[in-house]
Amino acid sequence: MIALTGATGLVGRWLLPLADLTFGRGPAGKRHRDYSLTGPPPDLTGVTTLIHAAFQHEPGRYRGGEGDNPEGFIEANLHGTLRLFDAAADAGVERVIFLSSRAVFDGLPPGTNLSEDLTTEPKSLYGQVKAAAETRLFSLPMVGISLRATGIYGPGKDHKWTGLFADHLNGRPVAPRRGTEVHGTDLAQAARLALTSATSGAMHVSDIFLDRHDLLTEVNRLTGCKIAPPTRATSPVSPLICDKLRSLGWTPGGMNLLRSSLSEMLPETAART
């Protein structure tokens, strides 16, 4: 039986089709057990694989998601996760898949090639929490896999670019930025492949480099908006090298998937050409 935490979140919803059982604060899926990161671990009876995607943070923020409460952020996201991992080991769970982040490398210089065997060097509290949770997971007597995902996007209520698109379409300033992105369906494909791995370790999950200039140019094409997108960003970006998943046959959708998804991600009030 596959269980999932965080199924109602912006990321967890992409993983929900994999789950037989969900743990969280509200029902999601056919079978559900109440659970909070700040409370005791849930009943793991019958669970063979646990996918842990729950994360407590300020809305819309991961780095800096602690807001003005770093102690609460650590208690929920580090100590709560460690309690969950230890309970999984005690219950005989065979496999844990943990949704981590490229932030475990955010102390390295921009432009660094981030291979899966590279030693982590987190700088933000977010990255430090993810790295510490990975360390515990890899030490436990089960298959522990950390999916270091980056820039997860896709249609849905309050998706990651909701505010960005609103700012652009309403003429508010948008700062240049370039980053790495992966569609939620490609994350789900990565998780499915992680279910087949026989060894513990990190798997990187990243697809495209995307500049806001290019993204908002596509938005303009779809909406007829005449507002100029920001200039191209000039700062280097550190790519996640995804050798393990690609060796398993992972084939993310690239720019074609981005373009086909954008119309579903725009405000309903945005005029289409």
Image (cartoon, rainbow, N blue to C red):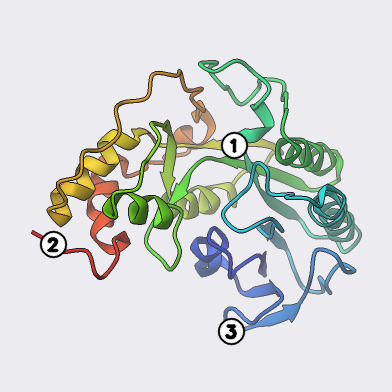
As helix, strand or loop, the secondary structure at mark 3 comes to loop
User: How far apart in space, not on screen, are marks 2 and 1 (Cα)?
Assistant: 39 Å
User: How far apart in space, not on screen, are marks 1 and 3 (Cα)?
Assistant: 29 Å
Q: Which residue is mark 3?
A: 30
**Sequence-wise first label, 2 or 1:** 1
Instruction: Using residue 54 as the reference point, say whether residue 255 is left or right of it.
Output: left
Which residue shows up at 30% across the image and 65% down it? 267
Quadrant for the N terminus in the image: bottom right
Whether 226 is drawn above or below 213: the answer is below
Whether 115 is drawn above or below 88: the answer is above
Instruction: Using residue 193 as the reference point, say whether residue 58 is left or right of it.
Output: right
Quadrant for the C terminus in the image: bottom left
- The residue lying furthest to the left in this view is 273
Q: Please tell me in which quadrant of the rendered image residue 94 appears.
A: bottom right
* Front residue of this view, candidates 9 and 160: 160
Q: Are marks 2 and 1 in contact (CB under 8 Å)?
A: no
**Mark in front: 2 vs 1:** 2
As helix, strand or loop, the secondary structure at mark 1 comes to strand
The amino acid type, in three-letter code, at marker 2 is Arg
Whether 207 is drawn above or below 85: the answer is above
Instruction: Using residue 238 as the reference point, say whether residue 116 is left or right of it.
Output: right
* Front residue of this view, candidates 155 and 51: 155
As helix, strand or loop, the secondary structure at mark 2 comes to loop
Report the disc number at residue 68. none
User: How far apart in space, not on screen, are marks 3 and 2 (Cα)?
Assistant: 37 Å
Q: Position of residue 163 (x, y in %)?
A: 42, 55
Which residue shows up at 78% across the image and 50% down it? 68
Q: Which residue is mark 1?
A: 203
Report the disc number at residue 272. 2
Whether 145 is drawn above or below 166: the answer is above
The amino acid type, in three-letter code, at marker 1 is Met
**Mark in front: 3 vs 2:** 2
